[in-house]
Amino acid sequence: MASAGTPVLPRPGQGEIWVIKLPTEPPDKGLRYVIVVSSNAQNHHPRASTVVVVPIGTTLRQNSCLQLTPEQTGLSETSEVWGNGITTVAKKDLRLPRSPLRTLSRATVVKILRCVVRAMGVLPSEIAE
């Protein structure tokens, strides 16, 4: 339970889409959609102040690792996962989207994490235990 004066942090779930001003982007850049990829153990822990996210955007490229359809996300356009943009953000900076969006399936989150691994120059098969 939060003490008096302590803000209650959001409790995002893995696969949820949130909005944030990413600290790695230029100051004039607005809010961006991100997908929470950290585990729910971290996301829901009352003392964890951060989550791991992957940005998505609507500028589509031919060599995209993964595209998400409006049916998957609830967004109005097809989106592209930016696996090389994975970052840790403060929960306090997360904002709910204007309209409710879909939570991505576990299978889709795993595909996103494979994109992240490939963006780091490693094949997913190289890290299998």
Image: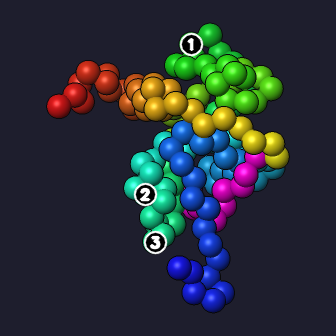
Q: Amino acid at mark 2?
A: Gln
- Does residue 123 appear to the left or right of 59 in the view shown? left
The structure residue drawn at horizontal position 31% and vertical position 22%, both measured from the top left corner, is 123
Dividing the picture into quadrants, the one containing residue 113 is top left
Q: Nearer the viewer, mark 1 or mark 2?
A: 2
- Residue 63: mark in rendering: 1
Q: Amino acid at mark 1?
A: Asn
Q: In whole angstroms, how far apart are the C-alphas of marks 1 and 3?
A: 39 Å
- Which residue is disc 2 drawn over? 42
Dividing the picture into quadrants, the one containing residue 41 is bottom left
Circle 2: element type: helix
Where are the magenta residues, as a range? 89-97
- Which residue is disc 3 drawn over? 47
- Does residue 120 appear to the left or right of 89 in the view shown? left
- Position of the C terminus, as image quadrant, is top left
Q: Nearer the viewer, mark 1 or mark 3?
A: 3
Residues at discs 1 and 2 in contact (Cβ within 8 Å): no
The structure residue drawn at horizontal position 81% and vertical position 42%, both measured from the top left corner, is 99
Mark toward the start of the polypeptide (2 vs 3): 2
The structure residue drawn at horizontal position 42% and vertical position 29%, both measured from the top left corner, is 110
Give the image location of residue 49, x and y in percent.
Answer: 51, 66
Circle 1: element type: loop
- Residue 41: mark in rendering: none
The structure residue drawn at horizontal position 72% and vertical position 23%, both measured from the top left corner, is 70
Give the image location of residue 68, x and y in percent.
Answer: 63, 22
Q: Amino acid at mark 3?
A: Arg
Give the image location of residue 71, x and y in percent.
Answer: 69, 21
Asked whether residue 95 is in view, the answer is yes
Residue 76 or residue 61, whichever sits in front: 76
Asked whether residue 29 is in view, the answer is no
Membership of 93 in magenta stretch: yes
